[in-house]
Amino acid sequence: MKFILHVDMDAFFAAVEQRDNPALRGKPVIIGADPMGGKGRGVVSTCSYEARKFGVHSAMPISLAYRKCPAGFYLHPDMNKYSEVSEQVFTILRDFTPDVEPVSIDEAFLDITGSYHLWKTPLSVGQTIKDRIKKDLNLNCSVGIAPNKMIAKIASDYCKPDGLLEITAGKLLDFLWPLSVNKIWGVGEKTKETLNRLGMFTVGDIAHASLEQLHHRLGEHGLALYELAHGRDYREVTLDHEVKSVSNEHTFDEDTRDINILHQTLSWLAEKVSYRLRQDDLKGKTLTVKIRTGGFKTVTRARTLDRRTNYFDDIYHPAKELFDEFYASIGGREVIRLLGVKVSNFEDLFVQDSLFEKPGSLKKERVHLAVDKIKNKFGEGAIKRG
Ligand code: TTP
Ligand code: MG
């Protein structure tokens, strides 16, 4: 029997801004792209609960938000500030247990099974965490406590804002079954539609469905949903195992100064890095190229990218430029022994930028998705850049 606690800050970016500027308190505050009087492109990152009353929400086009709430206070995200506050939140959480798994910039799981008795009950851990965050940071959060991660997260979501909710093992199914199917993990719009077509609208409907039918319609995924619908989720809280970078390098069999071979190598290194980032759902903002010459001199050249990315050409083109600049600087005189490409700086990974922000992005995403699929099915060597 475990006690898992899920903490999620309320209206995080907007709450930080309201805290730091009293004039914004109690007001609809919208963080995101510039609305430019309703003509702005880009999306809403988040908004205060006051703005949510107007129907504004995360990921909504900023132009639509502006139409719904023209009198709102529109602010650009200040990622440095939010990252700093996020660090402070995580420092507080680690005072309660070292078993803290960060999920996003404002969200974490804590396994308090072995430590809750220090505060008497799991619920009092939750209350103490809320009090600390309020007192030290003047921010609100919501806390869910349950025997597993999925239920803890559903609980914190359910009691938002400024809530605290414990779902005990005995109450678990009473809580879970009336909820809409999309509350359980892995049910997005498409699966929800499929389930609805089969007459399943609540989690309880899935729990009472036949396993054969779920398997027939949804394959392995159907079986997983059945387990989750019974409140069975055995995922462990894993410690901060944050990936700091994704890189790949290649040592040539023979040192070379053939520019075509060098560019081709950068291309497939970029391809590999892009694929690995996509497998792990990561996007990075810093690109580093590593170059070792035949004389064993190693240099690195780094560049900050315009936006976080895991797209091949966003990685390849700057990598090639960095390499070309370096190679020109030594007059192309030395042979090259090794090349490496690295993407790092995932820290604002959690800010989902709209695919539509930049024209062409949607198409690019589709091409990458198609390539990912082929590689997943037939192996990484199955498809190559021409
Ligand atoms: P969330 O925890 O999803 O949202 P929230 O904290 O603003 O509001 P809630 O009270 O419902 O938890 O996300 C945390 C922060 O991440 C959010 O403040 C801004 C950022 N974010 C984006 O930039 N884009 C997004 O689409 C989402 C969902 C969040
Ligand atoms: Mg939040």
Image: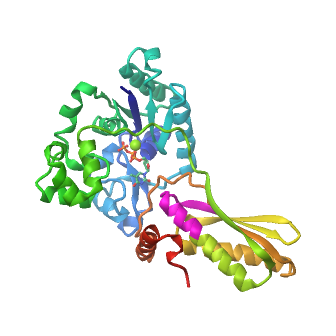
Depicted 110 relative to depicted 128: above or below: below
In this orientation, which residue lies closer to the viewer: 38 or 286?
286
368 in relation to 149, above or below: below
Residue 374 in the image: x percent, y percent?
A: 43, 73
Say above or below: 316 vs 37.
below
Q: Is residue 57 magenta?
A: no
Q: Determine which quarter of the picture holds residue 25.
A: top left
Q: Is residue 378 visible?
A: yes
The C terminus sits in image quarter: bottom right
274 magenta-colored: yes
Above or below — where is 53 with respect to 146? below
In magenta, the rendered stretch is: 272-286
Judged left or right of residue 376, residue 92 is right
Image color mode: rainbow
x and y percentages locating residue 90 in the rendered image: 53, 35
Residue at 39% from the left image edge and 23% from the top image edge: 127
Residue at x 41%, y 35% (from the top left corner) = 7
Residue at image position (55%, 45%) is: 83
Q: Position of residue 118 (x, y in %)?
A: 47, 15
Q: Nearer the viewer, residue 201 or 308?
A: 201
Residue 161, image x, y percentages? 33, 36
**Left or right: 383 in relation to 198:** right
